[in-house]
Image (cartoon, helix red, strand yellow):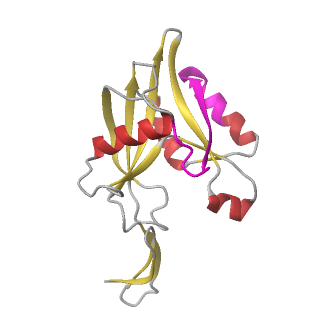
Amino acid sequence: MKEILFETKYLNLIASKRMNKPDWVYVKRPNASNVVVILPILHREDGDYTLFLTTKRPPIVEEYGEKFCIELPAGLVGDENKDETIVDAIRKELLEETGYDTSNITILVENLVSSGGLTSEKSILAVADICNLNKKAEPVNDGGVIVDRVEVKIDKVFEFVNDMQNNGFFISAQTLAGLFLLQNL
């Protein structure tokens, strides 16, 4: 049994009522069915690259100061169109956040959670192969959240992430999951 403690358009605070135990309070997104996280693989003449976003997320800034986060492109499924499929959301978010389109999507994980004790949100992690390197759209900055896009050669991604962490950047859990799975592609 659950009880909504606080409700907004984008997040709800929920109490899970448990017999003879304290309530477990967590966050739920009422406006989306899933999150898609996209590991873009850009096939260039000199080798394969992936693309990271440098973001400035309000919760991180509020709690830790002017810090940046390294993330993969991502977005909500069904937040604007309830009939949106996972593949539709992957294509839409990839285009919005990178400007690229893809001809091949491979779903790697369907039930990825970043913090199962904090939120019921689950992510789908997919690879998007990008062979046509001509951007189809100008990427959006998502209200100032996305501050940069960085293309990194695949054989340098762990070095890049390590350098970013050593320079005080936060690294999203979904990004680390994507890089873990990248080793087996």
Q: Is residue 52 above or below residue 79?
A: above
Give the residue drawn at x 38%, y 56%. 122
Picture quadrant of residue 137: top left
Q: Is residue 33 above or below residue 160?
A: below
148 inside magenta stretch: yes
Percent x, y of residue 96? 45, 40
Q: Nearer the viewer, residue 146 or 167?
A: 146
Q: Where the N terminus falls, by quadrant? A: bottom left
**Which residue is most to the top?**
45
Q: Is residue 41 above or below residue 5?
A: above
Percent x, y of residue 119? 45, 66
* 161 displayed left or right of 123: right
Percent x, y of residue 168? 75, 46
Looking at the rendering, the stretch of residues picked out in magenta corresponds to: 139-161
Picture quadrant of residue 152: top right
* 113 displayed left or right of 143: left
Q: Nearer the viewer, residue 102 or 170?
A: 102
Q: Where the C terminus falls, by quadrant? A: top left
**Which residue is most to the left?**
83
* 176 displayed left or right of 112: right
Percent x, y of residue 4? 40, 82
Q: Nearer the viewer, residue 157 or 49?
A: 49
Q: Is residue 16 above or below residue 153?
A: below
108 inside magenta stretch: no
Give the total number of marks visible in the rendering: 0
Give the residue drawn at x 29%, y 42%. 88
